Image (cartoon, rainbow, N blue to C red):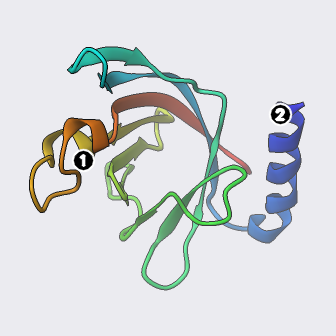
Amino acid sequence: MGMIKHVSVLLLLIPFYAHSEQYVCTPEKMTGFKYDSQEKKWNYAKFKTDFQYVLTPGKGKFAFNLVKVGDANPTGGCEKGFNDAGFLFCSIPDGDFKFNKFNGRYLLVSDIGYYLVGKGMWAETDEDSGDLAFQIGKCKPFN
């Protein structure tokens, strides 16, 4: 049922961007670290990958927007378009998204929570900190 919803949303987006460069990105694996408040330590973690992103041309400040399917607001933005090597570099609130349009591979790193811990930082304690996550996947062009 969830996949049907995702595909339906993607199909609705196609007419708006039919004449532009756009991609649907699907995670393959996502791993990292999660803080265990009972054990008081960081442990290895495996995260779910049952979602997708849409990478579409942006307006205004961003050349491209990265939007998680089902979310109303962009997950991140890419200030510049693809470079000569076919790479796209984007920022997300807690890390980075990098995409190679020639092999279709992307890497999303969510790393701000782990190292920005302490008084006056992102989080005051490890318990308040975000997970450290590495996500790999592939993007395919719509057109």
Q: Is mark 2 on a helix, strand or loop?
A: helix
Residue at image location 74% in from the left, 51% down from the top: 143
**Relative to 47, does residue 82 appear above or below in the rendering?**
below
Task: Please say whether residue 129 is visible from this viewpoint.
Answer: no
Residue 120 in picture, x, y percent from top left: 12, 62
Q: What element carries label 1?
A: helix
Residue at image location 68% in from the left, 64% down from the top: 72
Q: Name the residue under label 2.
A: 2
Residue 108 in picture, x, y percent from top left: 39, 39
Classify residue 69 as left or right of residue 82: right
Residue at image location 21% in from the left, 37% down from the top: 126
Amino acid type shown at disc 2: Gly
Of labels 2 and 1, earlier in sequence is: 2
Classify residue 78 as left or right of residue 29: left
Image mark for residue 112: 1
**Relative to 24, does residue 74 appear above or below in the rendering?**
below
Residue 138 in picture, x, y percent from top left: 54, 32
Residue 51, picture quadrant: top right
Amino acid type shown at disc 1: Ile
Q: Residues within 10 Å of mark 2 (few under 14, many from 20)?
A: few
Image mark for residue 39: none
Q: Nearer the viewer, residue 137 or 1?
A: 1
For the residues bearing labels 2 and 1, Cβ distance under 8 angstroms: no
Q: Which residue lies furthest to the bottom in this view?
A: 60
Q: Nearer the viewer, residue 49 or 83?
A: 49
Q: How crowded is mark 1: few (under 14 residues within 10 Å), some or many (20 or more)?
A: some
